[in-house]
Amino acid sequence: MAMPSVSLDRPSARALHRSQDVASPARTAFDLVCEVEKWPVWLSFVRSARRLEPAEQIALGSEIAVRSNLIPGEDEELFEVDRYIPGHQLSLVGAFSVRRRIDIRIEQKSERSKLVVRVDYPTYGGMLGALVDRLTRRRKLDIALNDSLIHFKGLCEFDHSPDAILDDF
């Protein structure tokens, strides 16, 4: 089960933060994270995601366009990769608002790994706007993020070899 946790390095106390243990190597998990076009398969709050330069590998400064049904903002938000450690971390920051962040980190734990995802976005409208957001959209996003990590776990642990079904016989 994906457990909420608190991290001391979080810049925002309102950021959604979830983690999930995955029974696969960190390299396999990170390769799945770097397939941006497949994010809607496991990130349930993302409708579409695409790299603006699909021919290039993800690197520092790469741009990714994300359409989300739960993160408020424009129809399609532009994010830039501001932190990238191959095999370990992919961090996106909003191109026009640095308060919009999606951080994905993979931690290696022996033959298992741990996926840690943090999503943050600004709320406007003072205390009333923050309260309404906390009771509506942020709660839905928290549930969707929890479900998304479980979907990621299933995709990452699924054995893709075609003869795996017959191994029992």
Image (cartoon, rainbow, N blue to C red):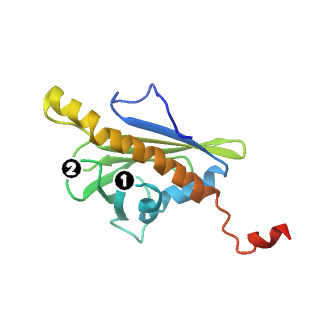
Q: Where is residue 49 in the image (x, y as percent from the top left)?
A: 36, 62
Front position in the image: 58 or 44: 44
Measured along the vertical axis of the image, is residue 157 above or below residue 167? above
Label 2 or label 1, whichever comes before in sequence order: 1
Label 1 crowd (10 A; few <14 / some 14-19 / many >=20): many
The three-letter amino acid code for the residue at tag 2 is Gly
Which of the pair 104/150 is nearer the observer? 150
The residue located at (34%, 43%) in the rendering is: 140
Seen at 43% across and 46% down, the residue is 145
Q: The N terminus appears in which quarter of the rendering?
A: top right
Q: Tell me where residue 114 appears, x and y as whole percent.
A: 59, 42
In this picture, residue 18 sits left or right of residue 168: left
Name the residue carrying label 1: 45
Q: Do the residues labelled 2 and 1 touch (CB within 8 Å)?
A: no
Residue under label 2, please give it: 73
Q: What residue type is labelled 1?
A: Phe
**Residue at x 41% of width, y 55% of height:** 44
Residue 14 percent across, percent down from the top left: 33, 31
Q: Mark 2 falls on what kind of element? A: loop
